[in-house]
Structures are given as C-alpha cells and as structure tokens.
Image (cartoon, rainbow, N blue to C red):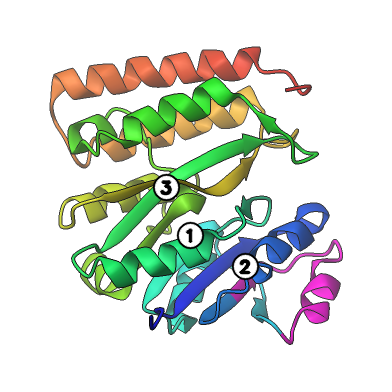
Amino acid sequence: MSLPRISIITPTLNRASYLERAIGSVLSQKYPNLEYIVIDGGSDDGTLDILKRYSANLQFVSEKDRGQSDAINKGLRIASGDILGFINSDDEYETGALLHVGRFFEQHPEAFWLSGRCRLINERGNEILKPITAYKSLLLATRSRNLLLVINYISQPATFWRRKVLECVGYFDTNLSAVMDYDYWLRISKQFRLFITHAYLAKFRLHSSSKTVESAIQEWDEETRMIQRYTQSKTLLFFHQLHRKLIVKGYQRLTINT
C-alpha cells in the first residue's frame, strides 16, 4: 500500500518541559512518509536547543509570531503533505496513530477529514478524567453539525484533513486565540462530511498552567462570539451557553491532583 505523505505541525512557545515528549511521540511513529514541522514563537527557555538536537528529523522555524494561529498557518504554508494535522507541544500521539491515519485515508478516498478519540493525561502522563473522554467519544460518534454548534466534541490533536480542505477552507483565523481549532472544524463541516475512527489517536495534557478558571472564562467568551458567526438559532445558542457554564463550573472543581 502506498501511504500518503503526512505533514504534522507543532506550534510552541516556552514549552521546553513538554516539547521533547511531543517530538518523541511524533518521530517514534516510524511513519514512512512523514514531514514534521515545528514553529517556535521565539522561546527563551531552552526550546531552541531541543529543536537543534532533532534538526536531522524535523524542520523548524524560530521567530516572533502573532500567536498560535499564526504559527499553525506558517507551518501549513511550509507543509507539502497530502494529509495535514497539528499537535501542540504539550500533547502526544498514541503509538501507531499516524499509520492508522495514513491507512484510513488511503482506503477511504471519499474521506476529506478524520477525527478519532483522545485521552486526557496529567503532567506525569497518567490518564485522567476518563468519564469526560467517554462523553466526548459518545458525542463524536453522532457526527452532528448541530451538536457541534453546542459543544466542540472534536479533539484537536486527533484530527487530520486532506490538502483539498485547506484549499477550500483556507487558514486558521489569527483573530482567535483560544478557539481557532473549533472555528476551523465548523468551517470544514459546512463543506465536508466528518469521518471518524474509534481508535485512540492522541493524548491531551492538562497541567497547572492550563487549569485556570480565568482561561476557561476567556475561552467561553471568545467561543460564544465565534459561534454566533455560524448560527442565529436561539435554541442552539441557549444550549451552547448552558454547556459552557457547566464546563466553567467543572474547571472550578478541578484540582491540580487530577
């Protein structure tokens, strides 16, 4: 089987404590047709030293940028792969994830984007909050666009799309700082059917700097404004806001020990 070229992008800024694990999770895939690009926003915490050590196996750019969306877009403009995806510098891929993705797209030429399951892990890499993972997996199985307007059930590091999607949908919105991926999924879903796999493809890390009520509220406000671009349905907006309030309460209850 001729596997498609996969381009993976990692945007990063001062995440040296996790970056090497993220890089390792990509390179250890041993995917035979991989392009790996890291876009650093000008870190000053040792990130550049890590990138130089792995320079034989990845491409990297290190310069000031205008945030995460800008960094992802830089990577997309460099990428030459048929299949595209990005993983943040504190997240990881599951073993065999890229081989699973490559085979899926090769066997399903009608599929233009794919999302799978994603575990939640803590700072030490241990799986946490399994009921939340099960909940998102259940919602993912619906593939409902109306439901996607209520809750973002698509896990960013477990999602991949063909180059044709980029050509049709364009790049990430640099005006969004917290929900650029959610916005992108809604834009894709207007034109392309979502395909899913029940395989676990990635691990999303929750750590001390991400578990803040303030960041949850900031994301909630940005998300609500963004959703209003896609629907004027009072019912969908009501359930979206209700769900976000429940999420913020969940953040308030989370402890650093989870």
The three-letter code of the residue at mark 1 reads: Ser
- Left or right of 86: which side holds 170? left
Indicate left or right for 125 with 249 as reference: right
Of the image marks 2 and 1, the number of the one nearer the N terminus: 2
Q: Earlier in the sequence, mark 2 or mark 3?
A: 2
Please state the horizontal and vertical placement of residue 137, each as a whole percent of the image. Answer: 41, 33
**Amino acid beneath label 2:** Gln
Q: Whole-percent x and y of residue 168?
A: 21, 69
Residue that badge 1 annotates? 69
* Residue 88 seen in render: yes
Mark 2 and mark 1: Cα distance apart in space? 25 Å
Whether the magenta-drawn stretch holds residue 78 is answered as no
Residue 152 to residue 240: above or below:
below
Q: Give the range drawn in magenta.
A: 37-56
Label 1 neighbourhood size at 10 Å, few (<14), some (14-19), many (20+)?
many
**Camera-side residue: 216 or 185?**
185
| Helix, strand or loop status at disc 3 | strand
Would you call the spot at circle 3 few (<14 residues within 10 Å), some (14-19), or many (20 or more)?
many
Discs 1, 3 touching: Cβ within 8 Å: no
Q: Which mark is residue 29?
A: 2
Q: In this view, does 167 lie above or below 12?
A: below
Q: Which image quarter is the C terminus in?
A: top right
The numbered disc on residue 179 is none
Residue 116 - label: 3
Q: Does the magenta stretch include residue 41?
A: yes
